[in-house]
Amino acid sequence: MRKIFASIIIITLLLNGQAVFSQPDQQKPKLGILLVFDQLRGDYISRWQDQYVKDGFLRLTSEGTWFENCHYPYAGTVTGAGHATLTTGATPSIHGIIGNDWYDRKEGKNSYCAGSSRWTSIPPIAEVIPAPGTTIKVRGGGTPEKIRAETLGDALKRSTNNQGKVVSLSFKDRSSVLPGGMKPDHCYWFDTASGKFQTSTFYSSKVAPWLADFNDSKFIEQWRNKSWDKLYPNKDYKPFSGSDEQAGEGNGKNQGKSFPHPFGKIDKDYYDALYNSPYGNAVLLELAMKAIKTEKLGKNSQPDLLLLSFSSNDSVGHAWGPDSQEVFDTTLRTDLLIRDLLLFLDKEVGKNNYVIALSADHGVCPLPEVSKTKGLDAGRLATDKFSKEIEAALQEKFGKLAAPAKYLEAFSDTSAYLNYATLKANAINLDDATGFIKTWAGTQPAILSAYTSKEISLASTSSDPLLVSVSKSWFKGRSGDICFILKPYYIPGTYLTGTTHGSPHSYDTHVPLIAFGGGIKSLVIKEKVSPQLAASIIAEGIGISAPTSAEFTTPKEIWQEQK
């Protein structure tokens, strides 16, 4: 029977970048793998465990260490922040990736967390003509330059004198760029316009031959003119999720609200739909196995690192919601993908020659419409309308302004950036303005709390857990002047269907954390931990230094005794 070492675990989770305990001094695995499933909420592991095969999720949880109660400690639970946290072991207040985007006051526009116009894509991004009345967001070439803490990849390069290999792969650019760090050997992500994986000139002027071969293969085209149907066509999914078509569900990338979801001819719509299905994960797995074989990961004199993030779980979850049959089906297929990956690693790398830390970058909120059917107070906050209401309230309080002058300079995610020049010109103190907005926000039906930048800067002495979580997402020079926390089961945005994440509520913060592989014990840990542990687990497992800003060390009890 498994044991849970509660008191010792609490002691070992010290705020120290240096290892207090270490894996026994024996032959350590040569391949570390950060395995991320975007938006894989923490409860999915136990919720559907009776439906999994024995050698997928269940192999991980039975043979490895399963941290059942793993939560992000910060408020801004989005992809960029989550991936940066997993790979640095730090919170956004340290690594600086406070969101996927944030407002840059100097540039006067939003700044993307993993891209810059200083760099271009390789191969070049295919030209896409926007639909009438729409625009296309230009992010520039991928770059990790905005991260402000050492990543796991950087730590491996430092620890091995640049001899260990770092390979980072994902469909999303930020999910590959941020974990890869500053000096990966290979960093690739997917372009839905061309159907090819790419890098940027930050890293190289060309892609590796094995990546070019994969791009030229027809592997990704095998689903054309076919459909995504249920993994088990004769199985009734309703007892495990909801009805196949529920209020609030979207239709994906014009795929429809219910099974089957068709794929068409080979074009951008096909690649978008593939991304928005579990087959996007199948493509990434194939690429990952090719990378492991070609680069001989885990077979070199120094330890290597594979950073692998599967994005399709997130795309499916956004469209149909966590209680949908689509998410249930995608998770069942994720279970099979894990089985196939583990069997491949056992054969190709060696059963005890790799260490995996599996986690997710965030969870997800239920569809508000589904929550309402359960009697919960839930809804959607139209952020564009909300920001206009803030401006109107400010003008009513402090005086009307002649257009185009505004008190509010920008609104990004759920944070407001005030126009300092306007405040100064009208002799308005920043604290007075933010204090007024905070009071006004308290009258709004969707808002739970609002915190000013002054309050956030003093959060270290606060007993308010929400304020503390907001402070861990706050980074000076990037964060806004006031942050709004929506009530549970309310989501921000302009869409009338689908769902999202990004709050400090448990459905967004709860993610899996499983340590598995050579040297890892079979153990269940029920005490609350942070996914920040993932970076230290991998570093310890392959015998390198943890990233310099990693906040926690790994519990001694997860390591097997030396034989």
Image: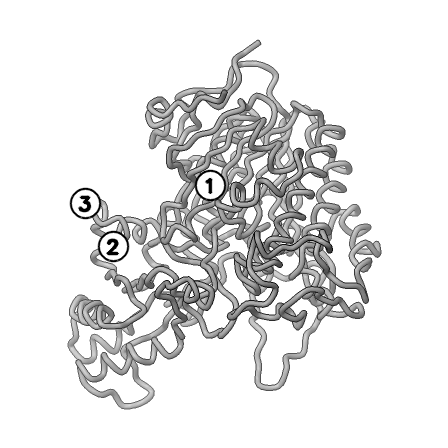
Which residue matches tag 2? 456
Image point 42% across, 25% down: which residue?
A: 555
Which residue matches tag 3? 461
Numbered label attached to residue 434: none
Horizontal relation, residue 477 to residue 101: left or right: left
Which residue matches tag 1? 88
Quarter of image, res 445: bottom left
Badge 1 amino acid: Thr
Is disc 2 placed on a helix, strand or loop?
Answer: helix
Do the residues under discs 1 and 2 have CB atoms within 8 angstroms?
A: no
> Residue 15 in the image: x percent, y percent?
33, 32
Quarter of image, res 342: top right
Above or below, 381 against 141 in this view is below
Image point 66% across, 73% down: which residue?
A: 254
Do the residues under discs 2 and 3 have CB atoms within 8 angstroms?
A: no
Is disc 1 placed on a helix, strand or loop?
Answer: helix
Badge 2 amino acid: Ile
> Residue 74 in the image: x percent, y percent?
36, 49
